[in-house]
Image: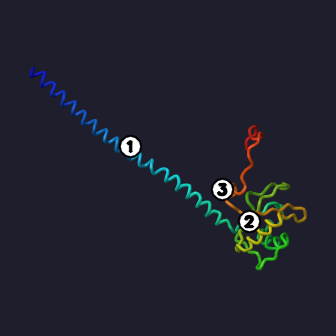
Amino acid sequence: MDANISALIAETKTIRQDIDRFQLRVQGLEQRVATVEDHLNVMPDCGQELLFLCSKVVDLEDRSRRNKVSFYGFPEQQGDTNIAMFFSQALPVITGLTFDRPLEFQRVHRMGPKHPEGSARSHPIITCFLRHEQVRQLLTEVHTHGPYSPEGLGIHMSADFSKETNDQLFPPPPPTSRHKIWPL
C-alpha cells in the first residue's frame, strides 16, 4: 500500500511539473500573441500614413513640375539642334503672345530616343521655364483658345503633371467590349 501511495505521489509530482511547464509555455505564447495583436492594431495606422505620404509625394512631384510644359506635334527636324533657342523665338510667333521678358528655359529636350529617318511620328518636347508667370500666361492662352495649328501642324501644349494627377484630371475611358477581346 505504501508503495502504491508513493507511486501515486511521484506520478502526481511529474504531472504537476508537466502542468507548470505547460503553463509557462502558454504564458509565453500569450505574450507573443499579444505582441502580434499590438502590431496588427498599428498596421491600419501605417496604411493610412502610407496613403498620406504617397499623396505628399504626388504633391511634391507636381510642385516640382509646375514650371514644365509639354509640347506635342513639333516635327523632329524642326529646331532639334538648339531646341531652347528655337522655342524662345518660335513660341511668341506661334501663340501670338507678347511676354514681358524674353523666354528663358532651364531645360528643353525631347522625350525618348529619336525615331528613324522619315518617320511621321514625333516625340513630345518638354520645357522647364525659369519664370512661372510665363508658364501661367502660356497655359491660360492655350485653355482659352485651344490648340494651335500654324501651317497645318497640330501643336498641342499641356501642363506637365504626375501620372496620378493626370489620371485624376483625365480618367481613362471605361472598357468596351473590344478590351475583352484585345486587352490593353
Could you tell me which residue is drawn at 24 percent across and 33 percent down? 18
Q: Which residue is mark 2?
A: 69
Image check: 74 left or right of 30?
right
Residue closest to the far top: 1
Q: Please, what is the three-letter code of the amino acid marked with disc 1?
A: Val
Where residue 178 appears, as percent x and y from the top left, is 78, 40
* Depth order, front residue of 159/116: 159
Q: Please, what is the three-letter code of the amino acid marked with disc 2?
A: Val
Q: Quick check: 76 above or below 97? A: above
* Depth order, front residue of 44/126: 44
Q: Quick check: 179 above or below 110? A: above
Image check: 111 left or right of 38?
right
**Mark 2 touching mark 3, by CB under 8 A?**
no
* Depth order, front residue of 183/124: 183
Q: Quadrant of residue 124?
A: bottom right
Task: Tell me the number on the disc at residue 33.
Answer: 1
Image check: 41 left or right of 114?
left
Task: Tell me the number on the disc at residue 164.
Answer: 3
Q: Does dot 3 land on a helix, a strand or a loop?
A: helix
Where residue 125 appears, as percent x and y from the top left, is 76, 63
